[in-house]
Amino acid sequence: GAVVSQHPSWVICKSGTSVKIECRSLDFQATTMFWYRQFPKQSLMLMATSNEGSKATYEQGVEKDKFLINHASLTLSTLTVTSAHPEDSSFYICSARDESTYEQYFGPGTRLTVT
Amino acid sequence: EDQVTQSPEALRLQEGESSSLNCSYTVSGLRGLFWYRQDPGKGPEFLFTLYSAGEEKEKERLKATLTKKESFLHITAPKPEDSATYLCAVQAGYGQNFVFGPGTRLSVLP
């Protein structure tokens, strides 16, 4: 099946610093990728839709200046958490949509801890 | 507004004790209903996609069914390795976002 990778799998950073998370579709091209956030024992909450070559679409309540998304190629989207604070600590998961089937495949997630 | 609910919130089964998980949805024009399995600290793993009422799909001990208002994930003779959170999601149309339910945490005891 289709494979989506994320890097890093976990990261610890100090408050005020920025962190970049990569999401790659390894064996298919993805015009559209999605970024989700998941708190413990809760379901996935969509943060933004990343479109290759254009600006991301953010869900209501998500700060676009804090969560910068870049989708520069058909296999790579990045999420940068700028000026991170402890409340940004969470599990961030990306998914990529296979344009030939419209199925979504999820990455393994990135655990962010801000100290 | 598209909505997805799942029940029960948590379920504990003895090994071999079959049961069903429920996913109820309200969506305008369902394009697909998706079941995922998620282990702690990992991303969701795709299980099934159902497209129309009456459709059924099976994979090992799992069987998913779909009606116009809900979907069931039947687990037959579960094993401890089936312990996970099971998520369902709906998509209202091609290119539309997924709406996830809160999940059912399944624990299968040996």
Image: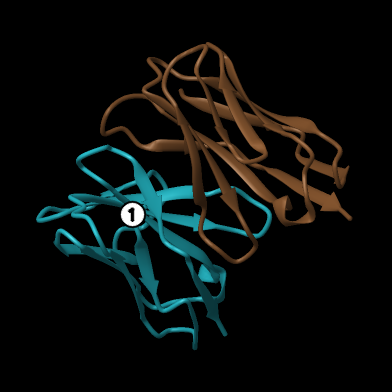
Chain colours: A cyan, B brown
In the current view of this chain or complex, which residue is farthest to the bottom? A14
Q: Position of residue B5 (x, y in %)?
A: 63, 29
Badge 1 density bin: few <14, some 14–19, many ≥20, Cα 10 Å: some
User: Please, is residue A8 above or below residue A88 in the view?
Assistant: below
Chain letter belonging to callout 1:
A
Q: Residue at x 59, y 28 (%)?
A: B64
User: Please, is residue B55 above or below residue A3 in the view?
Assistant: above
Q: Residue at x 38, y 70 (%)?
A: A6
Front-most of B2 and B43? B43
Tell me if A113 is positioned left or right of B103 in this view.
left
Q: Position of residue B17 (x, y in %)?
A: 86, 38
Tell me if B41 is positioned left or right of B12 in this view.
left
Residue that badge 1 annotates: A2
Front-most of B57 and A95? B57
User: Please, is residue B16 above or below residue B19 in the view?
Assistant: below
User: Please, is residue A82 above or below residue B89 in the view?
Assistant: below
Q: Residue at x 56, y 69 (%)?
A: A87
Which quarter of the figure is the C terminus of chain A placed in?
bottom right
Q: Secondary structure at mark 1?
A: loop
Quarter residue B72 falls in? top right
Q: Residue at x 79, y 31 (%)?
A: B19
Tell me if A21 is positioned left or right of B43 in this view.
left
In the current view of this chain or complex, which residue is farthest to the front? B60
Amino acid on which disc 1 is placed? Ala
Q: Position of residue A98 (x, y in %)?
A: 26, 46
Number of marks in the rendered image: 1
Front-most of A20 and A109? A109
